[in-house]
Amino acid sequence: MCLAVPGQVKEIFEAGGTRMGRVNFGGITKEVCLAYLPDIVVGDYTIVHVGFAISKIDEESAQQTLQTFHELGLLEEELGVESASGGLSASDA
Amino acid sequence: MKYLNEFRDGETAQKLFREIDRITTRPWAMMEVCGGQTHSIIRNGVDQLLPKGIELIHGPGCPVCVTPLEMIDKALAIAAKPGVIFCSFGDMLRVPGSHKDLFRVRSEGGDVRIVYSPLDALKIARENPDRQVVFFGIGFETTAPANAMAVSLAAKEKLENFSVLISHVLVPPAMEAIMTSPLNRVKAFLAAGHVCSVMGYWEYPPLAERFRVPIVITGFEPLDVLEGIRRAVIQLETGKHEVENAYGRVVSFEGNKVAQQMLKQVFEVTDRGWRGIGVIPKSGWQLNEEYRYYDAEYRFEVTGIETKESPLCRSGEVLQGAIKPTECSAFGTVCTPRSPLGATMVSSEGACAAYYNYGRFVKVEEIATACPVT
């Protein structure tokens, strides 16, 4: 119920006074309520729970996280430091 | 798919595993709060690739699992009433009540329908004005905005044949209950990312401070989970207890304020029983006075419920992180997803179902004993 994948808003319309939209999840399109995201526009990505779009995905923050991953361990590699064994390792098992 | 493939990349995962290994000097136990995260961890084998001392304790964040037995029995009684169309998320149909489940009610002639969203149930109510349509509104803060909207729309349309059986539970009081339990081993939390997408994380700093526990808002893809673990380990190793957001692309500090406004309009806080755990004070929502007309518990008088749990099932201990599913003697023997004894074996977010579906039948040590490396 709390698992959800990101989808892209393809269309926005009104139905009975409620803001609705069509959201594409990797090829599958679903009708979704957009009432909780009054600022979302066509082309934005969103996370949907039980038919309701709850949050708009922030591209800048996504890029920042990926950049953090990219930089991980780079310093050690550059300095030629071996993985500092803290005494615990999966290979100890 | 955008925002999915990047966060499932195997090479980056290896890098994160190496980094977690590098910074870990001592054993640490941390809890992933949400069942969706448990599912992701077991499915991707994250727990098996972590340094030996990092233990992931699976939290109670499975709404299907914690819905109290009494509520399931009430659902069964209402669903069996003539003239009622009972709508539910699919997960709930196989959850064992004291004597049967919703599938059984359906096979006995009850009109039980699986819906994807409460709005589908609302549509069924509009199309069937001569029938009573009841929606089983369970879940954490993530599904609450949907249920609140359905009730608010029903009130606006004066849809008199629609009601909801509400059993909403809240995450922060559960985290507090875990930290105050004498059995507690949790040293850090990977907080439930999608709950926070609704509620934000302004409720967490007092918890982190009071229990001196690091809280890292964590997502669901494998790399998100690993980043949550990495940040938690950094805090634990440096003696910090802060609230950090490792799922910034989806979660903001304040959360979705429009949704929070709707929740405030429709619900009020109440004490709630958690299946396998017991009553946690102020840990749930119920419809407030203004919307009580739409509360199925008030509309249908259900009395004489005597709950009876399976004496074998240890799902309560699983839900509190006290044991792993494989430590229960019923796991995989008399209790399987096809004939579950407890709700943790039913839901895709339940720890027992995750262990069963991804082949965790035996402990790693047992495999090592059975197949010694020569």
Image: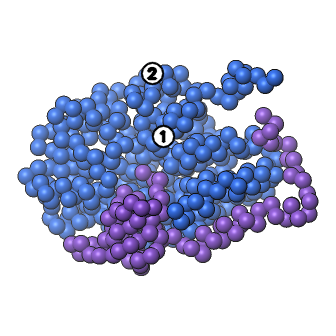
Chain colours: A purple, B blue
> In the rendering, which numbered label is found on residue B350?
1
Identified at 65% across, 67% down, the residue is A65
Residue B287 in view (yes/no) = no
| Residue B300 rendering spot, x and y as whole percentages | 17, 44
> In the rendering, which numbered label is found on residue B334?
2
Mark 1–mark 2 distance (CA, rounded to whole Å): 17 Å
B128 and B342: which one is in front?
B128
| Left or right of residue B180, residue B373 in this image | right
Instruction: Name the chain letter of the residue that bears numbered label 2.
Output: B
Element type at mark 1: loop
| Residue B257 rendering spot, x and y as whole percentages | 43, 72
Classify B190 as above or below A68: above
Quarter of the rendering containing residue B65: top left
Quarter of the rendering containing residue A34: bottom left
Which one is earlier in the sequence, the residue at label 1 or at label 2?
Answer: 2
Instruction: Name the chain letter of the residue that bears numbered label 1.
Output: B
Identified at 45% across, 61% down, the residue is A26
| Residue B58 rendering spot, x and y as whole percentages | 57, 42
B334 and B280: which one is in front?
B334
- Crowding at dot 1, Cα within 10 Å, few <14 / some 14-19 / many 20+, comes out as many
Q: Split into 4 quadrants, where in the image is the C terminus of chain B? A: top right
